[in-house]
Image: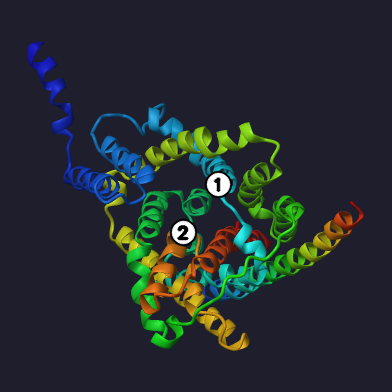
Amino acid sequence: MIIEGLSSLLIGFSNFQWSHGVMIAVGCALLYLGIKKDMEPLLLVPIGFGAILVNIPMSGLMDEGGLLRHFYEAGVLTEIFPCLIFIGIGAMTDFGPLLENPRILLLGGAGQFGIFLTLLLALALGFTQLEAVAIGIIGACDGPTSIYVTSKYAPHMLGAVSVAAYCYMSLVPIIQPPIMRALTSEEERKIVMKYEKKTVSPTLKVLFPIVVTLVTCLIAPMGTPLMGTLMLGNLLKESGVTDRLVKASQNEIANIVTLLLGISIGATMSGPAFLKAQTLIILGLGLVAISLDTAMGIFLAKIMKVLSGGKVNPLIGAAGISAFPMSARVVQMVGQKANKKNYLLMHAMGANTGGQIGSVLAAAVMLSLLKGMGIV
Amino acid sequence: MQNMEFGLTLTVLGMGGTMFILFLIGLIVDGLNKILLRGEKKEEGRG
């Protein structure tokens, strides 16, 4: 009896596999990046800890009826968490710089090219059509969108795709500058873009989320949950009459959902399921996707430079991704290194908020096309 | 549907659709801003 009792206390050790050990180390690495390096700590800390918890043998956290399984099924598989996060993001985003220069929205579209080019690459590497869609969406550089699409069409890849999306988002200051320098000349980086504050009607700020919702959702209705929640959050903010809801969206809702989302994603990273060659390929393709986004954004900005008679600095194209506001800050930093008198921040902010809309829109268009083509 | 046919269709229509919708939103927003500002100036003039 005593020996049986003692052996039950060793059950965790007796069921411990090498893959659990590796994933606990990965969880610790994510905690290190979040805590010591300040890389997306709000997400990497719960994801890292979730990864540690789920790799404790016999803990039962992801078994039927397990605690993390409840969070995962109720919030991730139902797509509720990413949509709630979008309400918070919408309530925190100021589309003012974008409204001053709406043409810059196109840069937010060019920053999504990586999604589609990476999708082609994933197909060429033998992934199934829906897996390729989930991998390509890492190029949206937008965590909630990646989670929404992957949980819908390739839930077995959710851990790898989410970790790739959030890690690369936080690595934007490291990934983007070399690409920006390689694709632009010193002369181009020195171009000074004057910033003249243009008048935007206060009514337009309220109408903007409604217009975006109607236009995008009527053309690509499958993306309505994403675009609708993002724009709902922004409408709450700009309407000026729902202060309590705005504060709740920016704080309580965003914080609680971020915590539960993070720990649920970490819970998908159990050793035997996560440690595959496929995971490494997904991480590699994610890096390719974000690099291609940056490159294509710069190329479109170069075209704008030619069309505007040299008034546009091509660097702002790199901000057409969804990683807000890191990407805009990187553009400002690289621009100022080339020319100390250069202040690209407001232009880059416009492109960056355009990237937020562009990433959700690209996903919405892709989902609607999949439905139209009979793939889903 | 073959994988490459699927991928190319999604790329062309997906990217084209995204750029078209963003262009459309840009046009609408630009137009709305001009109309609203004109209206607001008229109201200020009356006031």
- Residue B15 lies, in percent from the top left, at 60, 72
State the image coordinates of residue A45 (x, y, percent, origin top left).
Answer: 32, 42
Q: Residue at x 71, y 65 (%)?
A: B25
Dot 2: within a 10 Å radius of its alpha carbon, few (fewer than 14), some, or many (20 or more) residues?
many
The quarter of the image holding the N terminus of chain A is top left
Write down the residue under mark 1: A92
Q: Is residue B25 visible?
A: yes
The numbered mark, 1 or 2, whose residue comes first in the sequence reads 1
Pointer 1: residues within 10 angstroms few (<14), some, or many (20+)?
some
Q: Residue furthest right?
A: B46
Q: Is residue A326 above or below residue A38?
A: below
Q: Residue at x 8, y 11 (%)?
A: A2
What is the quadrant of residue A27 in the picture? top left
* Location of residue A63 by image quarter: top left
Label 2 belongs to which residue?
A323
How are the colours assigned in the image?
Answer: rainbow
Task: Report whether residue A367 is seen.
Answer: no
